[in-house]
Amino acid sequence: MVKKIMNDPKDIVDEMLEGFVFAHKELQWFKEYRTVAVKERKEKVGLVALGGSGHEPAHAGYIGEGMLDAVAVGNLFASPSPDQILKAIEAANRGKGVLVILKNYSGDLMNFSIAKELAEEENIRVESVVVKDDVAVQDSTYSTGRRGIAGTVFVHKIAGARAAEGAELEEVKVTAQKAIDHIRSIGISLGTCILPGLKKPGFYIGENEIELGMGIHGEPGIRKMELKSANELAETMVDRILEDLDYRKQEVAVLINGLGGTPQMELYVLTASLKKVFAREEIAAYRVMVGNYMTSLEMAGCSVSLMELDEEFKRLLDKPCMTPALRIQ
Amino acid sequence: MVKKIMNDPKDIVDEMLEGFVFAHKELQWFKEYRTVAVKERKEKVGLVALGGSGHEPAHAGYIGEGMLDAVAVGNLFASPSPDQILKAIEAANRGKGVLVILKNYSGDLMNFSIAKELAEEENIRVESVVVKDDVAVQDSTYSTGRRGIAGTVFVHKIAGARAAEGAELEEVKVTAQKAIDHIRSIGISLGTCILPGLKKPGFYIGENEIELGMGIHGEPGIRKMELKSANELAETMVDRILEDLDYRKQEVAVLINGLGGTPQMELYVLTASLKKVFAREEIAAYRVMVGNYMTSLEMAGCSVSLMELDEEFKRLLDKPCMTPALRIQ
């Protein structure tokens, strides 16, 4: 079924952003650059994210107090251009430098590196960190090394809180990198998604099959497997994460992220299953977030992200933020 | 495709609620009653909602400061029992009486009327209002008279703010009823949904077809029609609402509600289309909310709700609330 609420598919990103800033009047939109930014300019280190569209609410949904300052929005599942990224950097800059939070996709990194040069010609200090939280595969269709997926939301929150409390550019970067080092994610996909304007999906998942570790653009994961119970899925996902980083006997933040087409009911059932696995592994859940935080259009499935917490991370995680997609007070 | 993240389908509601209270530690769960409530007890009029599950985040997602105090959760698309509703009333009662916000479904109303009698035997004052915002059809599969759908979220917000500022039971009821009188909604469905445990949907929508006015349990709407552009859909939906209540030249709150399977991208495209229709009809959007507020499992589609605003409603709408699914500060 290819039924979508849209007009001309070529206008879908612009129209989405028009609707987005109509609903979120506290944000502004640089239309020709497809760049969204805060209106109110505070003197602090600026925070920028970028990425293709189709992952809403990521990333423009995380613009606001205590999180990001500007986001460059690419075409569907495609990197924004260097001039878009430059515009976001300019919009986020308050004279204290800008940290760009990248997910590890080759296109994002390449276009960012050009934008960084251009920004530095304008005497804007630019630093970056690269999120690669997905433990599924080492290299992938669009990445050399691990992919960045929903764990990125934790990086936005932690770095955003650090910038909001007045830290300098280098300090915000160090904290963001520390967050990245403590975050791991894994996804499962139950169904496919179709890019607006196309007639069929770019990949398939069988009738009673799921794919463990599929990327948020439908990139291949670890393996296809039979759909199992929520309890078994939770075990499989946590086991794969623990093979990579040992969260046992640690306090963690947990993100159970829907990919777009999976109802909240199922995400909360998986949450209950994770609770059992955490009890067995002596993992203490300090904060649990459940919802559609970084999606793949209407794809059915979810990802689980864990972040190990120390006192600094708990303090930063608990600091207020007020954005369209995440509000903590 | 019947692929769901679940264990035994008969446990899905209990497991969902277990996950829900694990994620939202500020809430408590009366397990044997499938009733969720605030932990902190403030002296104020209590607010209760009830309904079948499968509509998450409705209604338990609206429990918290400035909105509801307790929710009775029924089986999938089924009314909670009188003893569940009684438990929610007891949990919400602080000695100032309890207002129960009902949606107009026969089962909900019948079970509530029994619960109300039982509560009054315990000397709890109980009042109720009935939301019937859906302009699609006069009578329906599960209702005599109009159905209550996503506009209910506005009633929770307005009544919640009124109760939070210390109004008495009768005053909260009057304000809630005034809200109901000023809210109208209409939905469109693009795809079906399958109840966990079943093998196929209870209703069908054709390949290139949508249903205008379908209910949130798949009840028949006004008519099946060809899928049109977002601009045309926005016009059709607003026109149908305006036939019923004239919002022209008024200030309104707008809720663009996803039914579960529709990506945010499409909801925001529809938002941009609505912006155009509002401009033409001189409707001023004071607040615009976009997201999955009252769903039908993984159904694709959305609803649009309008609430006419006066100064009292603007004040109450802007008051802070802090719940899992709606946060305003």
Image (cartoon, coloured by chain):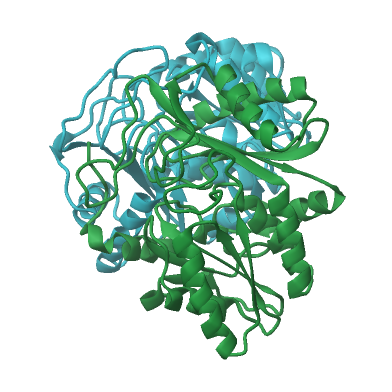
Chain colours: A cyan, B green
Residue ranking furthest to the left: A226
Front in this rendered view, residue A249 or B309: B309
Above or below, comparing residue A299 to residue A290 in the picture: above
Q: Position of residue A166 (x, y in %)?
A: 71, 45
Residue in view at x 16 percent, y 49 percent: A228
Front in this rendered view, residue B11 or A42: B11
On the image, which quarter does residue A42 sit in?
A: top right
Residue in view at x 61 percent, y 17 percent: A34
Judged left or right of residue B231, residue A90 is right
Q: Position of residue A287 (x, y in %)?
A: 47, 59
Q: Evaluate whether residue B329 shows in this view.
A: no
On the image, which quarter does residue A76 sit in?
A: top left
Q: Evaluate whether residue B206 shows in this view.
A: yes
Q: How many marks?
A: 0
> Which quarter of the figure is the N terminus of chain B placed in?
top left
Q: Position of residue A120 (x, y in %)?
A: 65, 16
Q: Position of residue B87 (x, y in %)?
A: 49, 79
Front in this rendered view, residue B307 or A257: B307
Above or below, comparing residue A57 to residue A243 in the picture: above
Residue in view at x 39 percent, y 32 percent: A148
On the image, which quarter does residue B323 sit in?
A: bottom right
